[in-house]
Amino acid sequence: MRTVKLFFAVLLGTTAAGSVFAGSGTPDDASKIIRGRYQAVLGDCAGCHTKQGGAPFAGGAPLETPFGALVPPNITPDPETGIGTWSEADFFSAMKRGIGHGGKRLYPAMPYPAYTKMHDADISDLWSYIRTIEPVHNAVKANQLPFPFNIRLSMLGWNTINFTEGEFKPDSQKSAEWNRGAYLVQGPGHCVTCHSPKSVLGADETDGALTGASLQGWYAPDISGNSYTGIGGWSDDEVVGYLKTGANNHSIASGPMAEVIENSTSAMKDEDLKAIATYLKSIKSEPAKPAPVKSDDAHFQAGALIYHDTCSACHGGEGQGGRQLFPALAGSPIVQQADAETLIHVVLNGSQAARTATAPTTPAMPSLAWRLNDQQVADVLTYIRNSWGNAAPPVASSKVADQRKP
Amino acid sequence: MEAVADRFIPADDLSIGGREAGCVLYLDRQLAGSYGQSSRLYMQGPFKPALPTQGYQGQETPAERYRKGLAALNRWTAENKSGKSFAELQPDEQDAVLKDMEADKIKLPDGVAPKAFFGLMLTTVMEGFFADPIYGGNKDMASWKMLGFPGARYDYRDHVSKHNQPYPLPPVSIAGSPAWLVK
Amino acid sequence: MTRIMPRKDVVIVGLGWTGSILAHELTEEGLDVLAIERGPWRDTATDFNIGYMQDELRYAVRRDLFLQPVEEAMTMRNNTSQTALPMRDYGSFLPGNGVGGAGVHWNGHTWRFWDSDFRIASHLAERYGPDKTRELQLQDWGVTGAELEGSYDRFEYLAGISGKAGNIKGQIQPGGNPFEDPRSRDYPLPPLPMTYAPTLFADVTRSMGLHPFPTPAANLSKDYINPLGIAMGQCTMCGFCERFGCANYSKSSAQTTILPVLMRKKNFELRTQSEVLHVDLDASRKNARGVTYVDTSGEEYFQPADMVLLCAYGLHNVRLMLISGIGVPYDPGTGEGTVGRNYCYQTNSGAQVFFDDKNFNPFIAAGALGQTVDDYNGDAFDHGGVDFVGGAGINCIPTNGRPIQTRPTAPGSPRWGSEWKKATVQAYKSTLGFSSQGSSYPIRGNYLDLDPTYKDRFGRPLLRVTFDFPDNDVRMSAWITGKMEEIAKSFGGRQYTASPRKKGWDSVPYQSTHNTGGAIMGADRKTSAINKYLQSWDVPNVFVIGASAFAHNAGKNPTGTVGALAFHAADAIRQQYLRNPGQPLVTA
């Protein structure tokens, strides 16, 4: 089972009785379909709706959400198990309002709160493309949520509180590139879905957007423009390189982001990636940098020894990392996030880098859960979060214990 | 066997003895596993007498050789050293018996070849003493501390160019190091 | 019941260095390639875990990553008058197993053979007359050094070799090996930082008028991105190279240089834990139909293919040919036949110098981190005044300080007790060792065939190795070891030892896993099993790639040449063979 991705959704996807009209009236001209295919890349539809090794868009692996499991449905044009009976209007409604064929409400794991910002023309292109996908007969039981979350009507209440429908409005004060970036990030790219803090019910906060959020076991980091926990210290080219290849001089993608890069950003046009970089770096945020944990702290000192004996052979004696192979820890935003969730996850479970055409190595870090106890994991993380100029809150062993639980 | 381990590796100012280091625990575990059962070796017949260049051609596994060899050693000491087992002999008497085995000077009962059995014991006891402590011997990395071997480390880049200078850090086991624990 | 599998363009037996190189090259050509590997899948982070790879007992002593005799053993004898018995445990040499093969746990010495090696028979006859080598069965390889230069270069750049060129396009380079053949460019990476012992060795040998240089190493001195776009790391000199997988991507292997790209190709497939039993020939015996293999469930499969590439360990290639009936088995009585011919090994010797006042920190080491002197190797010196041909590289390459197996003691020390302990502690850090990597030349009586008595777990005959060190090589080793004594003396230590290789090859103590020959390349189909492109003379849609192709073994580790021959064969297949599939590339 894949780890969490709250952001992906469950379309209703089944044979709702009633409407019979297929998507008609859309001219399936080739350039529109090609544009639509690119919209599918931007939106990373495959990330959820394609299971590893499975037929494209015929249903994904279960997503664990805080409310229970959701299985991304089959969105191929199969009439029985896919969305073959949908109209283009149904599709628009799902993308813009989270209401699927037959009026069923989608769980917002489907990022319609972001997709609602998409231009109508882009959604129309995407629809043209989706109609051309090979129909696959694959029945998916989408909803495995426990009561009361299995009642789709409850989404109505959620929507009235949390969801604002409406297309992206460009800011005329900003450059076309900035606006393109903002559109991609807020709309089809739905970056906000993971990287923005969640309220209790799981919507994206508008204040503090893109400053990082927990994803149950991973921490989607701050990707705003500050140079402490955000990406302000990266050049535009480095941001583009990261999204294109999965690696740059500062970092190597792993976990859910590795999948996003493999399925989506690595296939985006360079000018779109550049636009994303321009927009992200413009987002102002000012996280307070704490004073680093003192080097005479006993946990820091134990962590230093563990680091030297276990980690330095790859990450380097000074946390400098190695090109395309070992992420640098010194000066790393992900290492200094307020929440160490990702770091704990990686030490306990290991991790493998994204695989892209220009970065094919896919180096991996092994699990060290067998070698380090909770306190030792906490101590070595406290050490790397507070060495070589880094500063971040110390890690408590109880936090490691929580994440170690199966 | 503990007596043998302590004669091979006596406790002295350099290190603890083989007995305290856990060499026999190591041996018990090895003999219970694939090594002791020869399960990775080619064990199909025919078994024939070998030239010295052809290696061990016996049918007996290390576990069987130990069982038979130790019994034979104790029978020999019982018959030749006034009814005592090997462990009951004085250390210098034990040394003398082991030296005679090493030199093939005594004849053990039950067809046990003294020199070959001595070689087997020496090899396995030394393995236990110098292997990672996770295998039961080398308690507290005693042998590594004795030699100055830093153990299961993986990065010497900071010391490679410091020629002829002692390496400063204590050994680490696969299971970690006491220094990793906050006191 | 044998299940018949869907046809493939190419089936490769064994996915080590050569199998991976060939698979990559031929999938680039668009062919549908299947590799069948007897051992398990192996990958860096999961199988060479940085937390427990430093386990000397498991990996070096019990040899966890190696072929186990229960899977396949071999029998041995020193000459035809003896009865071969199985090596019930491997000792003298240790074949690899699993994806990556022995390239997973090698040390990384990466040499080029010289043109005088490839033309050894004609060259020595020209230089010394025919009598000098009459006792040997030396043969030219059918290729020249110049023909292979580009292939060596590709292997070295694939693998990110650290070294210092000695001769670039004829220009001698200070600090490199002045005796090497011209190369088109320097190594991709500079030499590793030197540890203390090789530094001293270089000083001493240089003061004696010799020409020390950094050993070309597949342990990377810097991070590197190879021509396939695969990233590798900097060697951390952990001292767990030979017999171990590399946990931090800093030793070249199929895993660190090819597989990340190869495994993602849609026209490549790998089946592990599947052992090829034989190559299936058609009724003409001149065409391979495919291979038969068995998986762990015991089920048998026939895999049809247009081409079969034997890319297993050299000894296993020869055995598969013999079992499958590819080519004529060699007969040591008449010297006729080709499969099993010119089996060679490596004629090594060692020296140790014991000091009172030095600390070499032997555990700070990499598999190929050291210095070499080639003044007494191959054709580097005049053999007019000596009673042998061949020679040796003299290497000071301390590979480890792992204490189960690396515990030198001064001569005369006891093996146990308090005195042993004192001697061990005294010598552990203060002993400098160096060794000769000696050439091994073929004689009529050294060969490979199938054992008449002993069978493997599938009932197939084991390979029988009939080998002893030829007199020529024993004389060579004595002379080289004399030179090593001169070097040892010059160190000015407390005492030294030196031990030349003697007659009577012993299968128990580890010596070298450089078994060569048995399916040798050459220009004459009467005396070679494969042509200069490593294509079987007898079954032209079979290529046999590995050290099995060596017509003799030089005084150097073989992997660089194995890699070069793999590229050489791949080029021939891509540029020539595929135009006329099934046809011989050389008519003779």
Image (spheres, coloured by chain):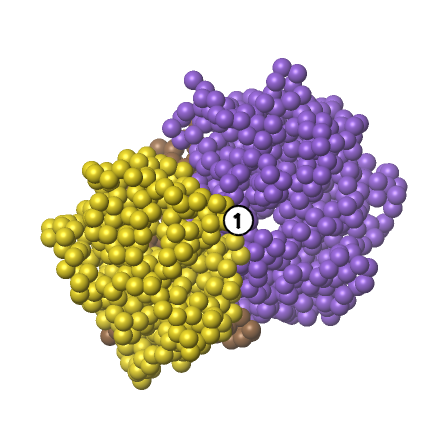
Chain colours: A yellow, B brown, C purple
Above or below for B159 versus A29: below
Q: Residue at x 31, y 52 (%)?
A: A92
Instruction: Specify the amino acid type for callout 1.
Output: Val
Q: Percent x, y for residue A128?
A: 41, 46
Above or below for B111 versus C326: below
For this orientation, the residue located farthest to the top is: C283
Q: According to the image, label 1 marks what residue?
A: C261
Q: Percent x, y for residue C30?
A: 60, 38
Q: Quadrant of residue A165?
A: bottom left
Judging from the image, what secondary structure is the residue with disc 1 in?
A: helix
Above or below for A65 versus A298: above
Question: Left or right: where does residue C230 sit relative to residue A181?
Answer: right
Query: Quick check: can you spot residue A300?
Result: no
Above or below for B150 versus A207: above
| Label 1: how many Cα within 10 Å (few below 14, some 14–19, many 20+) | some
Query: Quick check: can you spot residue A27?
Result: yes
Q: Which chain does the numbered disc 1 sit on?
A: C
Q: Residue at x 63, y 40 (%)?
A: C29
Q: Percent x, y for residue A285?
A: 34, 79
Question: Left or right: where does residue C178 sit relative to residue C406?
Answer: right
Q: Residue at x 37, y 54 (%)?
A: A123
Q: Percent x, y for residue A244?
A: 48, 60
| Along the line of sight, the residue nearer the viewer: C545 or C82 | C545
Q: Residue at x 50, y 49 (%)?
A: A31
Q: Quadrant of the C terminus of chain A?
A: bottom left
Q: Quadrant of residue C519?
A: top right
Question: Left or right: where does residue B138 sit relative to residue A70?
Answer: right
